[in-house]
Amino acid sequence: MSVIRTDKWLLDAYDNPVEMCERLTPYFEDASAYEIYQYLTVNGMYRPIKNGLEQVEDLQNNGVWKMVEKERRLLQKSWGGPDIPVFIFPSESTNRILFRNFNRKSGLAFCDKIFLFISPENKQEEIQALFTHEYNHVCRLMQYEKEEKDYVLLDTIILEGLAEHAVYEKYGENYVARWTSNYSEDVLEKMWQTHVFPNRNLSKTDRKHEKLLYGLANFPTMLGYCVGYYLINNYSKNTNLKSKDLLAIDSRMLAQIRE
């Protein structure tokens, strides 16, 4: 597979995204086009706006589809990753959280596919960094000997930490996510010891899992993401291992838990 030319889909059916998502039903088991679209919008996909096709044309003019395909081939070779389809759509332009925390872009990774939701305002390096983050997820899911359905909070934050560390390694400080600089190392260590470590074995189905991961309710913003990035940075500094070398290592070892 490769980067799917969703720009052609968008030019045909931008104002009818549910109809367009019929083309995605072969990639999802037992899900309707409507259910797929609703799920994707929750994760950052566009909702039709006036003159929205201009965004699609801007993305085309920016060479986004070809650029991501080139990046996909490079990372697949570098990390020994799988050959999976990549779908690119405009991001939700009115989503304040997406704007504030992720600069108008987001991604969604499965073990067998990736979605990127981006804006014409995103620079090439930002889009490459986003793809790097999401493709790292795919490689981790493939190489780590644990079923995703069995992931606990520790596995999830390590998944996010690995992905953003890969971005840092490849593109440097200027292109890591904004949340990576939310807290000092002292604060991150306290958050790890106080909030995450005692809840490290929380199932993905537990409501508190998402609250800790994103820093919802009364928890610090992007708590789990930030702590995961902190843990991976510490492990990388202590071992001098690169992103490729970390993909298959047990979460407890990466978090340097001795139990």
Image: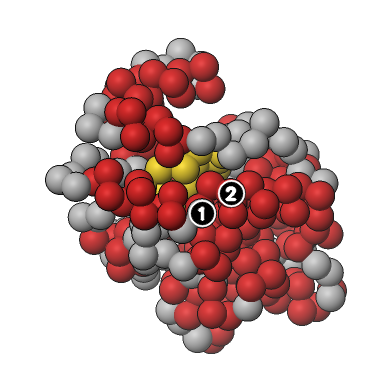
Query: x, y (%) of residue 115?
Result: 49, 41
Q: Residues within 10 Å of mark 1 (few under 14, many from 20)?
A: few
- The relative height of residue 107 versus residue 172 in the rendered view (above or below) is above
Res 200 quadrant in image: bottom right
In this view, the residue in front, 60 or 99, is: 60
Give the residue furthest to the front: 61
Residue 143 visible to an observer of this rendering: yes
Give the residue furthest to the top: 30
Which residue is at a point 65% across and 43% down the rendered structure image? 138
Which residue is at a point 37% across and 59% down the rendered structure image? 120
Horizontal arrangement in the rendering, residue 53 relative to residue 233 (left or right): left
- Tag 2–tag 1 contact (CB < 8 Å): yes
Horizontal arrangement in the rendering, residue 123 relative to residue 215 (left or right): right
Horizontal arrangement in the rendering, residue 2 relative to residue 49 (left or right): right
Horizontal arrangement in the rendering, residue 161 relative to residue 220 (left or right): right
Q: Secondary structure at mark 1?
A: loop
Q: Which mark is residue 66?
A: 2
In this view, the residue in front, 209 or 157, is: 157
Query: x, y (%) of residue 236?
Result: 76, 73
Q: Residues within 10 Å of mark 2 (few under 14, many from 20)?
A: few
Q: Which mark is residue 139?
A: none
- The relative height of residue 155 versus residue 129 in the rendered view (above or below) is above
Circle 2: residue type:
Lys
Question: Which residue is under mark 1?
Answer: 63
Circle 1: residue type:
Gly
Q: Quadrant of the N terminus?
A: top right
- The relative height of residue 75 versus residue 40 in the rendered view (above or below) is below
